Each structure stands twice: as C-alpha cells, then as structure tokens.
C-alpha cells in the first residue's frame, strides 16, 4: 500500500486488483502497473538517471512471447 502513491507520482498507471489484506501486520494489495516510455522517462528524471539500465538485445523467444501478460 505504501508504494501506490509513489507509483502514481512517478507517472505509472496503477490498477488495484482487489481489496487490501493484512500480511505480517501491514496492509498489502496486488496491483497491475502499466509502464510506458513516458513513465520510464519520468522515473529516470526523478532518480537523476540519464537513461534506463535495461536493454533488450534480442526479441523474446520461447514460451514468454506466447503467454498473455495476465497469466505470466
């Protein structure tokens, strides 16, 4: 739950997937987060980074490119 306002501040589109539940004394919630190039650029700016550290060198192969994102 603590992360929800921070994800919104960073520009991510966040969709809660249910009601909060208490885990080890802390309210927790599952969420779907849409990450766009614009939100990545905003996070880089907030963190003082010049660019993302993630680089894809090749297209996805195998079962990962066939599994719907909601099932992964």
Image (cartoon, grey):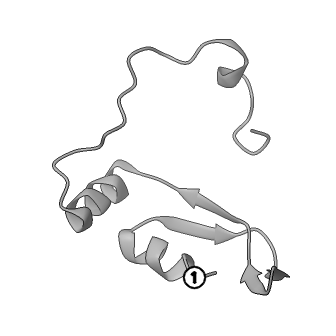
Q: Which residue is mark 1?
A: 2
Give the residue drawn at x 74%, y 85%.
26
Give the residue drawn at x 37%, y 70%.
10
Q: Nearer the viewer, residue 28 or 37?
A: 28
| 65 with respect to 20 (left or right) | left
Q: Quadrant of the N terminus?
A: bottom right
Q: Quadrant of residue 45?
A: bottom left
Give the residue drawn at x 43%, y 14%.
58
**Kind of element beneath mark 1:** loop
Q: Is residue 35 above or below residue 18?
A: above
Badge 1, how many Cα within 10 Å: few under 14, some, many 20+? few
| 8 with respect to 22 (left or right) | left
Q: Position of residue 48 (x, y in %)?
A: 18, 61
Extreme residue in the front direction: 24
Q: Quadrant of the C terminus?
A: top right
Q: Is residue 22 above or below residue 60?
A: below
Q: How many marks?
A: 1
Give the residue drawn at x 34%, y 53%.
40
| 50 with respect to 37 (left or right) | left
Q: Quadrant of residue 6?
A: bottom left
Q: Nearer the viewer, residue 23 or 14?
A: 23
Q: Position of residue 33 (x, y in %)?
A: 57, 59
Q: Is residue 41 above or below residue 11?
A: above
């Amino acid at each position: 739950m603590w992360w929800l306002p921070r994800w919104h501040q960073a520009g991510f589109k966040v969709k809660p997937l249910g009601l909060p539940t208490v885990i080890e004394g802390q309210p927790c919630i599952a969420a779907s987060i849409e990450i766009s190039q614009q939100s990545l650029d905003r996070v880089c700016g907030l963190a003082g980074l010049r660019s993302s550290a993630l680089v894809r060198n090749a297209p996805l192969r195998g079962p990962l490119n066939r599994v719907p994102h909601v099932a992964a």
